[in-house]
Image: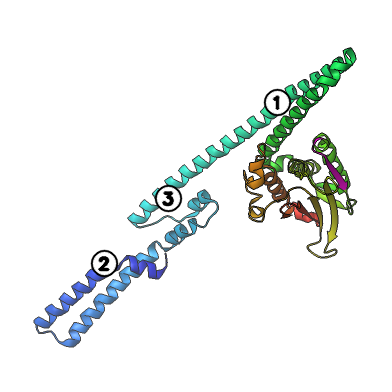
């Protein structure tokens, strides 16, 4: 609390003091006291009041300043512990209230952290458990398809597409399960995060292979372009997942009349070489239906699907949000560009300075 604020808080007391001094001056004048005596008495009273206010302000100044700084502190519990002990009764009451509120807030925050940690552990366990029946179902489906093909070629021709459709649905469930796993782990990236030097071509190829069946069924052809021999510092597993989300979006939002068929291009380039902000940019671009200008600023919002998402019942609005979230945690920049009806592109920027990842 500053001096001005302190004086303003004592405005009622000062008003009463002024009234009393006026009455005292009136009494002195009525009793025939000289003007010099009246002035001297008024001066002494004013000095005494100023001294009382100064002592009162100095007494708890450090406490009130600590209390003001508490609102700007990121660690309220530590700030409360470092506050000085107030002398005035009202200061002690305020300190006690702040301490109790801080303790309750700290307990609530700890409880929420425990809940989040337990929920994350449950989701990870559920994902691992869910993968087993999915794998078993795909294996049983493959065996069934082989048996039908061996026993009755005609039945194989009739039921083969249906069996492959079921296998495609299982693959989609598996992708959603994987998305849930990465969503849960995004809260604690530091526990499963290993930055190493990787060639972009290796990571891009791994992402394409992991989503090959989806791309084939959607008729999307991946094109590996220039600059993919450039090295980047990243966690290959997390980066491969991010690229997989972009590939799945490209497969989901294909454009039926795309010239040359539906395609997705991967190109990389080295920018600002030798400078402090030297970086490698990976551009993932497709020729799908694109995003409208109105929806483009919100594509990284969690759960946002936009006009295209409303036209596709399986859109969740989580893919690009996860890409943005994981990229920001890894120190990778993300930018998007699109022209509605022509295509969509995402640019990932990888800092070339390794020390960036250890700050």
Q: Residue 169 or 260: which is nearer the viewer? A: 260
Residue 10 forms part of the magenta stretch: no
Residue 221 forms part of the magenta stretch: yes
Q: Is residue 157 above or below residue 23?
A: above
User: In what element is the residue under mark 1?
Assistant: helix
Q: Is residue 248 left or right of residue 26?
A: right
What label sits on residue 13 in the rendered view?
Answer: 2
Q: Is residue 68 above or below residue 129?
A: below
Q: CA distance from mark 1 to mark 3?
A: 47 Å
The residue to which callout 3 is attached is: 98
Quadrant location of the C terminus in the rendered image = bottom right
User: In what element is the residue under mark 3?
Assistant: helix
- Answer few, some or many: residues within 10 Å of disc 2's Cα (few below 14, many 20 plus, some between 14 and 19): few
Q: Quick check: marks 1 and 3 in contact, CB under 8 Å?
A: no
Q: Position of residue 316 (x, y in %)?
A: 65, 39
Q: CA distance from mark 2 to mark 3?
A: 26 Å
Point out the tag, 1 or 3, that comes first from the N-terminus: 3
Highlighted magenta segment, given as a residue range: 217-223
Q: Is residue 272 above or below residue 222?
A: below
User: In what element is the residue under mark 2?
Assistant: helix
Q: Position of residue 16 (x, y in %)?
A: 22, 69
Q: Position of residue 146 (x, y in %)?
A: 87, 18
Q: Residue 238 or 311: which is nearer the viewer? A: 311
Question: Would you say residue 199 is visible in this rendering?
Answer: no
Q: Residue 154 or 96: which is nearer the viewer? A: 154
- Answer few, some or many: residues within 10 Å of disc 3's Cα (few below 14, many 20 plus, some between 14 and 19): some
Q: Which color scheme does this rendered protein use?
A: rainbow
Determine the image quadrant of residue 27. bottom left
The residue to which callout 1 is attached is: 130
Label 2 vs label 1, nearer the camera: 1
Q: Is residue 187 left or right of residue 199?
A: left
Q: CA distance from mark 2 to mark 1?
A: 72 Å
């Amino acid at each position: 609390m500053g001096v001005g604020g302190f004086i303003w808080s004592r405005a009622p007391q000062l008003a009463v003091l002024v009234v009393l001094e006026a009455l005292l001056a009136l009494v002195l004048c009525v009793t025939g006291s000289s003007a010099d005596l009246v002035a001297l008495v008024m001066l002494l009273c004013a000095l005494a009041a100023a001294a009382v206010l100064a002592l009162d302000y100095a007494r708890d100044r450090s406490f009130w300043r600590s209390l003001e700084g508490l609102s700007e502190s990121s660690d309220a519990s530590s700030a409360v512990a470092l506050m000085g002990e107030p002398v005035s009764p009202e200061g002690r009451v305020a300190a006690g209230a702040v301490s109790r509120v801080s303790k309750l807030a700290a307990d609530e925050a700890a409880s929420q952290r425990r809940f989040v940690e337990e929920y994350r552990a449950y989701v990870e366990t559920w994902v691992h458990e869910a993968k087993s029946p999915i794998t078993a179902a795909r294996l049983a489906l493959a065996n069934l398809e082989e048996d039908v093909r061996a026993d009755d070629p005609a039945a194989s021709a009739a039921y083969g597409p249906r069996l492959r459709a079921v296998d495609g649905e299982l693959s989609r469930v598996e992708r959603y399960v994987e998305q849930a796993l990465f969503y849960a782990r995004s809260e604690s990236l530091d526990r499963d995060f290993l930055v190493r030097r990787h060639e972009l071509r290796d990571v891009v190829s791994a992402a394409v292979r992991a989503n090959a069946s989806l791309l084939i069924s959607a008729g999307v052809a991946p094109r590996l372009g220039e600059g993919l021999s450039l090295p980047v510092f990243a966690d290959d597993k997390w980066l491969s997942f991010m690229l997989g989300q972009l590939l799945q979006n490209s497969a989901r939002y294909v454009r039926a009349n795309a010239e040359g068929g539906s395609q997705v291009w991967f190109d990389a380039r080295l920018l600002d070489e030798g400078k402090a902000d030297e970086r490698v940019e990976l551009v993932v671009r497709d020729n799908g239906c694109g995003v409208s200008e109105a929806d483009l600023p919100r594509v990284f919002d969690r759960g946002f699907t936009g006009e295209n998402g409303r036209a596709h019942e399986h859109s969740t609005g989580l893919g690009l949000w996860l890409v943005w979230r994981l990229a920001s945690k890894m120190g990778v920049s993300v930018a998007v560009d699109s022209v509605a009806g022509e295509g969509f592109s995402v640019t990932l920027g990888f800092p070339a300075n390794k020390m960036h990842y250890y700050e």
